[in-house]
Image: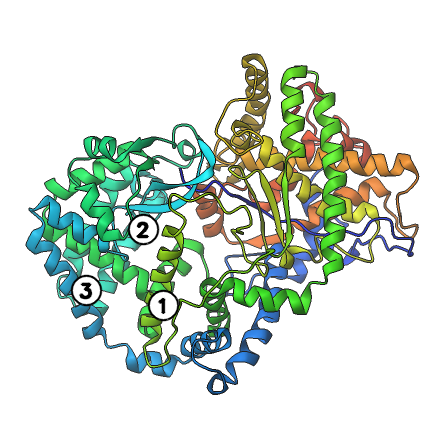
Amino acid sequence: MKRNIILFVSAIMMLGCNQPKSAGIRTENLDTTAVPQTDFYQFATGGWQQLNPLTDEYSRFGSFDKLGLENLEQVKELVASIAEKENTYSHGSIEQKIATLYNQSMNMERRNNETDINAFINERNEMLDAYRAVAHNRTERSKILGAAMEYGLWMLYVEADPGNSSMNLMQEAQAGFNLGEKEYYLDTDEATIKIREAYRAHVARMFGLCGYIDGEQSADIVLRLETRLATAALNNVELRDPIANYNKMSLTELQDLCPQVDWTVYFEAMGCMPDSISVGQVRHLQEACRMLEDESADDLCVLFCWQMIDGAASYLSDEFVNANFDFYGRVLSGKKELSPLWKRSVGIVNNVLGEAVGQMYVKQYFPEANKQRMLTLVKNLQTAFGERIQAQDWMSDETKALALEKLNAFTIKIGYPDKWRDYSKLDIDPSLTFYQNLQRAAKFEQDYSLSYLGKPVDKAKWYMTPQTVNAYYNPTSNEICFPAAILQYPFFDMNADDAFNYGAIGVVIGHEMTHGFDDQGSQFDKEGNLQNWWTAEDRAAFEARTKVMEEWFNSIEVAPGVHANGAFTLGENIADHGGLEISFTAFANLIKSGKANLATDSEFTPEQRFFLSYANVWAGNIRDEEVLRRTKSDPHSLGRWRVNGALPQIGAWYEAWNVDEDSPMFIAPENRVQVW
């Protein structure tokens, strides 16, 4: 299956400090005209929404995005200062690679002049002509497909074997339909049909920019073939089942499953030879392979050509960049303006040379003391989670013991890796075009992934860079990871009291921990193996309780006639729920111990501030188009519902804010979610 890394935000707080503390609540972020018992999200974040209106650049802008922007500006300072001195660095140094890549990305005049579209197309036509010539020959077409980097009907990558988490395994996943979610190709509601029509027009436009005179016909072919692939694909809910998406087999078994490809030849051309593979989505791969024989070579080459164009568009001339934005930005997300070139350029450097930039970033912005404080906080949250596991009356002692073992076996990664990635084999050459250097970078990444094949899993490897404003839980390594960049306000405020910091960072750290015990993570044992450790009765009780969560979110109308997808967002909603319960327990323990550091200058009680700081993490504005897109594609609930959907399930919130039966947000205790 694909790497099941669940993304969330987390941060750092300071414990055991005797300095005076502020309440941390910024009153300008509140909307005091709203009634908290009626719409807590509006009360807690309405002021923030007014102070941070959506600009044309964004389809969504929230607290998370605001911190991301501040962080991007920090990274820009680092990268731009290096880029100014490009000519002073020796070729092959990290500084030269950063400088060349950034300067080439920023130089649109050169990109406009050097983008010889005829050369771009001719290069691809040579590849496609080679495929057409051998399409009838299984061995020869397998060789070309295996060597291809820029197109394909499925994807391959190397990561930990879910059935044997100590070893890496070749893994396959569905691909080939560029809109990503199968619903875009199949749903018949008015909004989706409009997107589909706009996509077809976009494909035709891009073919036209490349000089093809049959753009309209080509667009029809692309849409037909992508629809065929999407129809055979699993939907996002089905992709959440780790057992159904783990199908390990030998190459002989793979050959029997999909005989249209000579897999030995394919992998030889790819530069590797696995002895086994996990086919993520069997039905999709079989359909994709059947297409190699029952679709014409000409039609397949149209699809392959489109994949090349679509993958390159953001890195070519202005006309390609702008056309690409018109669909993916304006139509699909509702954005009105392309992000400034410097933001896109910093993003590219981050993507290609992430840990090299990260090493510079942590030296500048992340003191070692922060890492140690974070480790202390995580330990406190683990203790509280252990207490909550012990308190669950629906779980047997046998399963509780194994749950506690898994909790205590977490690998905790804070700030930055202990060892940094080596980029010495990546050659960024100033004499090449920007796009040619990005092709080199893509090949470098592919080789890096394949270098792990058949080897033990590197437990020190990070799946995010230190300058990434995000965090994750990885089930196959049973690890929680908090990059340096996320450890800032509004998730942590060094000057705020424990109520604020437990409500913000404490909850989000608890969220990451809970991912080890959500509907997906709970199927992996303490070693990260996909193995059942539950009694049948406990698993049934767990699923019955999480079903309440699923149905509750299914009932939420996120737009007129559009409901949230409770099954798709279940893991994130369980993690929000667990994070709130765990962190509030830890906060209550601190108060009982007499060690809580609490402000005395607030009109709100400590318990109220806990929930206000949590809500402020999810403050934001969002466009209607983005609401629809994220409802289809994002496993996280929308920000409003991470507050108004989650808090009515938490008993402590009712007590803190005096929420009674007359409140529109009230849920009877017997109908609330009760898990973790």
Seen in the picture, residue 403 relative to 312 is either above or below; the reply is: above
The structure residue drawn at horizontal position 77% and vertical position 48%, both measured from the top left corner, is: 501
Q: Is residue 216 left or right of residue 431?
A: left
Query: The residue under label 1 is which amino acid type?
Result: Leu
Residue of label 2:
178
Q: Assign the C terminus to one quadrant of the image.
A: top right
Query: The residue under label 3 is which amino acid type?
Result: Arg
Q: Is mark 3 on a helix, strand or loop?
A: helix
Residue 610 horizontal/vertical position (percent): 78, 43
Specify the label residue 438 is tagged with: 1
Q: Are marks 2 and 1 in contact (CB under 8 Å)?
A: no
Q: Decide which of tag 3 and tag 2 comes sooner along the chain.
A: 3
Find residue 409 and report its image quarter.
top right
Specify the label residue 124 is tagged with: 3
Q: In this view, does 38 lie to the left or right of 149?
A: right
Residue 75 horizontal/vertical position (percent): 58, 69
Question: How many angstroms separate mark 3 from mark 1 (CA)?
Answer: 16 Å
Query: The residue under label 2 is which amino acid type?
Result: Asn
